[in-house]
Amino acid sequence: MPNSRRRQTAAIRSQFTGESSFFAARGIPRDRSIGLDQCTQVQQRLRAYLALYLFNSGKRAALPDTDLTAAITMYSLVVSAHRDKLILITNAPANVAARICCEADSIHDRGVPGMRLAGVAGVFDSYYLHHLPTGGTLVVTQPQGHLDPPVPADTAAARRTSNWALLGQPMSRAEENRHAAWPAMSPSMTPLLAGLVTRLNLSDPGGSWATGTWFWDPLQQSRSRPDISTLGLCARRLWGSGDDWALSWEGYPFAADLICAMTDPVAGVAGLTVLRHEQRTVLCLGSARLTVIHTPKRSRSTEGRVGRRAAALNAEGGV
């Protein structure tokens, strides 16, 4: 793709994702799309399985021990999708990465099973994670990160992360058991669930919809919709098998915003359609069917609470 066309496409992508031009331009594929779904099969599987840990939380969770990882949705996050990696951009990369990576001693069932620290870059502002079951790569970095080559995690330069499970450490029995509980996904369902992850924080440039990392409504001040209670991590459930799955949640985003993000002519999942039957809304991709069920908890006033909670999490406190 000519550089001028790449820059134009990257500018369009940035309007949806909030990425800087640096990250957006490097995620543009050759097919002239904005590149939210164009990735290797390895990366697609990583994103789909990561969805299980982002969209299961609280009292509705279908999997145990997901709240720690799901809580990264309460941070300020920009999701940058690339062919060979998924990048999470945040002001608190150490905290976010620690919620995803497993611990070395395996005492606590925390993080995504099989997630390992492969390396660090910069002054601990970029963390390269490798997922053993899928082979996928996840990078957590700061907005100013430049994707420098990582220093191997087992070197002296990476001692700060000594309690994290490092690349080369096999999965523990506890991790294997947790991984074995993951349901099977059909070839059509995998890209659908992966698409939820890459659209975790997507906004319409025209201001008509936004997903807000599933924690807040970026358009709250510009549209008249009832507030939703966001005190703490809201309950979510993502579960199914094969082609038939369901996603339910209590907090943000509004169901209409999620549907718009998934079906947008520019930023949506190619080929995805919406089926509405009585009280059900189903996202369809090939043979896959994902039923979406939003039962929001209304709040009289959440103004200010979202900002205070997000600021507290981004203050580099403990994990």
Image: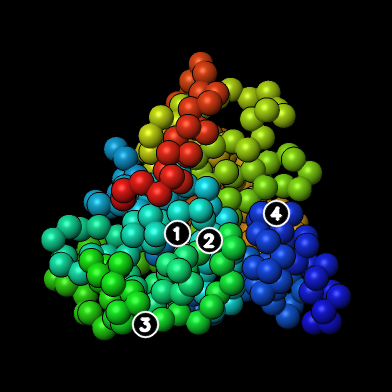
Q: What's the colour scheme?
A: rainbow
* Residue at left offset 21%, top offset 75%: 171
Residue 247 appearing in the image: no
Q: Position of residue 143 (x, y in %)?
A: 58, 59
User: Distance of mark 1 from mark 4, alpha carbons?
Assistant: 22 Å
Q: Nearer the viewer, mark 3 or mark 4?
A: 3
Contact, CB < 8 Å: mark 1 with mark 2? yes
Specify which label sits upstream in the sequence, 1 or 2.
1
Residue 290 appearing in the image: yes
Badge 2 element:
loop
Answer with left or right where residue 97 lies relative to residue 202.
Answer: left
Badge 1 element:
helix
Which mark is on residue 222? none
User: Distance of mark 2 from mark 3, alpha carbons?
Assistant: 19 Å
User: Distance of mark 1 from mark 3, alpha carbons?
Assistant: 17 Å
Specify which label sits upstream in the sequence, 3 or 4.
4
| 159, 280: nearer the viewer | 159
Q: Which residue is mark 3?
A: 152
**Above or below for 249 versus 223:** below
| 273, 220: nearer the viewer | 220
User: Distance of mark 4 from mark 2, alpha carbons?
Assistant: 19 Å
Contact, CB < 8 Å: mark 1 with mark 3? no
Answer with left or right where residue 267 lies relative to residue 301.
Answer: right
Specify which label sits upstream in the sequence, 4 or 2.
4
Amino acid type indicated by mark 4: Phe
Specify which label sits upstream in the sequence, 2 or 3.
2
Which mark is on residue 93? 1
